[in-house]
Amino acid sequence: MRTRSGRSARGDAALTGAVFKAVAAGAHMTADAPGAVRTDASAPARADASAEGPVEPWWGGVRAAAALGLSRTEFARAVQLGIVRVGPPAPAGGGARYARAELDRVRAAEGPPEALRERLATVAGAEAAAAVLKVGPSRFTRLARCGHVVPVGYRINRYRAVVWLYLAAELREFAAREPELLRGVAPAADRELMAARGDLRPRTWRGRHVGLLLRRTADPWERAAVLASVLPEDEVREAAPDPAERIVLAALAPPPPYGHPQVPVAAAVAQGLLKALPPEEVRRYRGDLDLALRGARGQSKSTGDRGPT
């Protein structure tokens, strides 16, 4: 039986199978998730033998966090921000792993654990963030809604409201860099946005989140999957009309960020933060996805495989 495109159903099945094989051979974003840390702190370090060099020891997340003097949450934030780089996936699968040499590099670059913890410290909500800036909560809310400060994460509280998290170090840097915004009359653009009940916090957080994910991979299919993950489904279908390509994008889609709620009611609220909503934001990510797919398809054409290589 042949489809209207002239491709047989058996050929479609073979193509889809090849896609899954290609995905399995690539580096999955899910293996690099900040929250995918090994829970067995007593597990021995794993090692991969290399014919070209010495054996490289690999540590699970709990042991790696302890080596840096960080809590699990602090370590996940360090991975999210790219301070700690995740190693390649283990051949047999499993959680994320970290090279001992990478942990040594972080210790040398960041200094004592106290300095790294200070860099990773977050504050939750407008009142705590305003206290860091020494302004009132209402002024801080205006600064955040107008995009002057960018959240690094979020929580969903018991009332199903979004509580934004901010890096305390970034807030202090902002106060030193933009002291005029901490006092006096708000700029005209801010007043207009507030009058229109605008709120840039979800958009600026998505921009940060996507940027951090893109920095963690050079694979064109993984980069396309990151961009597709923030777009509405109809936009992805238009950009990738081939179902086999959409299978690849779905398989390589990054997991929700560390701290994303597991309770269904809260998760439903948080899920809305993961997708681009304003038309201009959708257009920007769609344009980036089109470019990424063009590069990914070019790679596939040169290698003869569909999906990551």
Image (cartoon, helix red, strand yellow):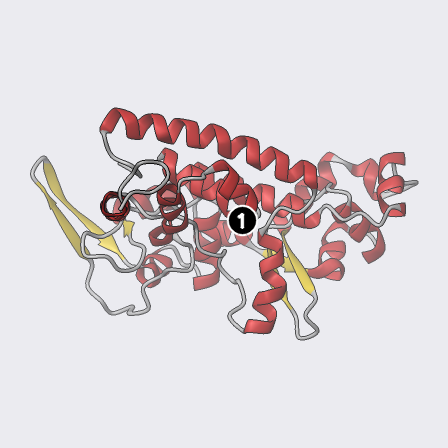
Tell me how many marks there are. Answer: 1
Please tell me in which quadrant of the rendered image residue 240 appears: top left
Position of 269 with respect to 107 (left or right) is right
Please tell me in which quadrant of the rendered image residue 285 appears: top right
SS at circle 1:
helix
Taking the image as drawn, is residue 231 in sight?
no
53 relative to 91, above or below: above
Q: Residue furthest right?
A: 185
Residue 71: percent from left, percent from top: 44, 63
Position of 94 with respect to 162 (left or right) is left
Q: Residue at x 48, y 28 (%)?
A: 291
- Closer to the camera, 69 or 31? 31
Reading the image, the residue beneath label 1 is 233
Residue 141: percent from left, percent from top: 79, 53
Q: Residue at x 57, y 48 (%)?
A: 232
268 relative to 177, above or below: below
Q: Residue at x 75, y 58 (%)?
A: 126
Position of 30 with respect to 18 (left or right) is right
**Image quadrant where one finds the C terminus:** top left
Residue 307: percent from left, percent from top: 31, 39
Q: Residue furthest left?
A: 51
- Closer to the camera, 51 or 287? 287
Residue kind at label 1, given as amino acid type: Glu
Taking the image as drawn, is residue 138 in sight?
yes
Crowding around mark 1 (Cα neighbors within 10 Å: few <14, some 14 to 19, many 20+) is: few
Q: Residue at x 52, y 62 (%)?
A: 259
216 relative to 31, above or below: above
